[in-house]
Every structure is written in structure tokens, then in C-alpha cells.
Image (tube, grey):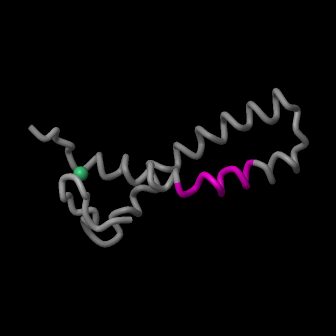
Amino acid sequence: MPDRCPVCNQDFQIEPGFYIGALWTSFPIVIFIMALLSALLLIYLKMELNTFFITITAILFLLQPIIIRLGRAIWINVFVDFKEES
Ligand SMILES: [Zn+2]
């Protein structure tokens, strides 16, 4: 993760532990993905429960880098306003 925004020079290291709070923004994303996958794999594909847990763990593990960044982006947007450059 870069220290500053390359576009607007916003400091991304606002304070130590700032992104611990991003837990609360990435968690609902994970729940949403899990709900969608559960419906798809269990109801439509009628997947075995053990296979389902292995599959969902693998998928979420692979999506983790994206989910973390998305959660952090949402988190910093709660505290820092984005202003269009004029
Ligand atoms: Zn920026």
C-alpha cells in the first residue's frame, strides 16, 4: 500500500492502527459474498457440505487482497472527503 495518494497526495497513514477499523467495512463485503456463494453452491449446484466449505474458503482466500483494499478504501472515505479537482 502506498504512503500517499499519487493523484491528490492524501496521506494514507493517518495514524497507527487506522485500518483496524476497516474490519467493519470488509466484514459486510465478506458476508455478502458468502451469502451469494452459499445460495449458488448449495441451492443451485446442490454441493456437498464438506466440498462447499473447502470451495468457499478457497474463493474467499483468493479474493482477500481485493476485499482488504475495498474495505480500506471504504473506511478512509468515511473520514476523508473526496473533492474533485477543479
Ligand atoms: Zn487521491
Instruction: Name the residue located 18 percent from the left edge and 59 percent from the top edge.
Output: 9
Q: Position of residue 49 (x, y in %)?
A: 87, 45
Quarter of the rendering containing residue 34: top right
Q: Looking at the magenta stretch, what is its main secondary structure?
A: helix
Indicate left or right for 59 with 70 as reference.
right
Q: Can you say which quadrant of the picture contains the N terminus? A: bottom left
Q: In the rendered structure, does residue 44 fall within the stretch colored magenta? A: no
Residue 4 occupies which quadrant of the picture?
Answer: bottom left
Residue 54 position, x and y percent, is 81, 53
Which of the two residues, 59 or 16, is positioned nearer the viewer here?
Answer: 59
Pinpoint residue 2: horizontal percent, then vertical percent: 33, 65
**For residue 64: magenta?**
yes
Which percent across, then down, holds residue 7? 22, 53
Left or right of 57, for residue 71: left
Image height of 37 relative to 16, above or below = above
Say above or below: 59 vs 47. below
Q: Which residues are magenta?
A: 56-65
Q: Quadrant of the C terminus?
A: top left
